[in-house]
Amino acid sequence: MKKLLISIIILLSINLCFSQSQLPQHRNFRISIPQQKGTPTNINITNSGEYILEFSDLQIELLFSSFNVYKFEKEFPTSTTPLLQTIYEIETDDIQLMTNLINDFSNVYPIVEEIPTALITNTPNDFGITGGAMIKDFAKELMRLELAWDITTGDPNILIGITDNGFDLNHVDLSSQIVTYFGPVIPTGNLHGTKVAGCAAAATNNNIGITGNGYSCKLLLDAGLNINNMLELSQNGAKVINASFVTGCTYSQVDQLVMDEMYNNGTVVVAGAGNGLSTSNQIVGCGPNDLYYPASYDHVISVSSVGSRNNIGFVDPVFGKVNWKDCHEQLIGDLSTTHTHNSEVDLVAPGYQVLSTADGNQYAEVWGTSFASPFVAGIAGLILSINPCLDPDEVETILKTSANNIYLIAENAGYIGQLGAGRVDAFDAVILASQMAQGSNIQLTMSSTDANCVGPDGDGTATANVFLGCGGGSSTYLFMG
């Protein structure tokens, strides 16, 4: 990700208690079972956790009996999408099972694909803020949050869902914000999710710690880095979901269907685009600016990073031209210090050296699209607080239309078209959302080629009540004679 900072990547393993030298690494893959022939007729689980599977087809049964299987269950049990209801997750210690299914039983299992281990998209350089010291929050200043909060301080009925590797549920700046937590309690220490949650919706105006972009919006949290966790949050009322992880640079038809279902539920999904070299160095076959998922799926707002701390032209005596406001390169002139940029990025937000919550009632400076993404999710929460009936497309349109154009900055000239609509601007976003609120009086202007066409006020103009969101309805256009 950058030369001046030590990269720390957390890669979660499904074998927490054993090293690879002790046991074969377990691998997970998914299959679709559209016909009864491919479904086990009976499943027995041994004391060691192995699945003994029986099938009506003896050839399929023989294949599965040749491998150790530790899971065979529906991957998306609560999904309402017909194809997703046929998807099963299989865990084994020999991925050859997946290969054999592809080669020998493609007519029975038309979809067979590996489920990649999720990679957290942060590269933190943490320190605790002691003694309650006040530190200027450059990121929120750049996004104009204080002005936005003059328009709305959020709505506790707007729930922001986050699925991650765990959270400090007792953090003084998070505990009052959490409506529901799904999953097991994860021991604290350096949990990535604690930092992500703070960016989206840390408790605000409480004389403690930091502010969260969503202000009064609340949190739904889930421990787990997989797509089904996201779907469950959507089904449990999350209006916005943040995903600060990547599953790789390979498109999955199945995962896209999950994104579609959440979209149809009315859920706005936001995800980190990736951390450039820091991410690609951890995933074989992926480049720093490839399309990473889930950020690059349809119906997902992909977020990359810009600086927020120093004015353009500032030269740090140690690090030089670093962390310039609205510039994509963290170290100006060093292309290797950028986070992921590509044609599917929708927006950028501060993602270098930003403040958030950390385990143990601490606070930290963090780096990564893991934190740029929940900044945008929090602002999406503010937009929905003004008009909760906006659909995901309308929220995305507001975020993009109100974004700050950063392509005019010379240092971003090499990234035109790869940083989306620009840097998110909370103030302009909530202003636009308030103008779109149900019953707003918006003056519309139309030109007419008919010289006799005069508006109802006699001067070629009129004011129309435009009903958007929940109300739906019509509008009266204005005419210029």
Image (cartoon, helix red, strand yellow):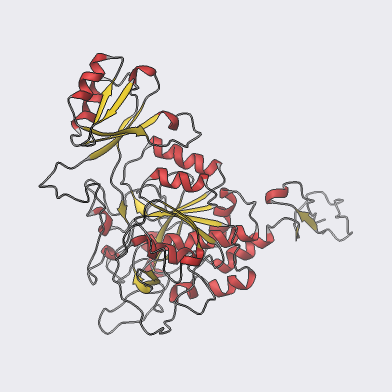
Depth order, front residue of 83/480: 83
Q: Position of residue 40 (x, y in %)?
A: 32, 22
Q: How many labels does the image show?
A: 0
Quarter holding the C terminus is bottom right
Query: Is residue 272 in view from this perspective?
Result: no
Q: In this view, does 442 lie to the left or right of 103?
A: right
Q: Is residue 393 left or right of residue 459?
A: left
Residue 216 drawn above or below residue 10:
below
Point 21% across, 19% down: residue: 62
Q: Where is residue 253 in the image (x, y as percent from the top left)?
A: 39, 35
Point 20% across, 37% down: residue: 48
Report which quarter residue 110 is drawn in: top left
Report which quarter residue 258 is drawn in: top left
Q: Position of residue 126 (x, y in %)?
A: 30, 72
Report which quarter residue 114 is drawn in: top left
Q: Is residue 106 left or right of residue 468?
A: left
Query: Is residue 158 in view from this perspective?
Result: yes
Depth order, front residue of 220/406: 220
Depth order, front residue of 271/235: 235
Depth order, front residue of 438/406: 438
Point 35% across, 48% down: residue: 291
Residue 198 drawn above or below residue 107:
below
Quarter holding the N terminus is bottom left
For the view shown, which residue lies furthest in the front direction? 47
Q: Where is residue 242 in the image (x, y as percent from the top left)?
A: 45, 55
For the view shown, which residue lies furthest in the left direction? 21
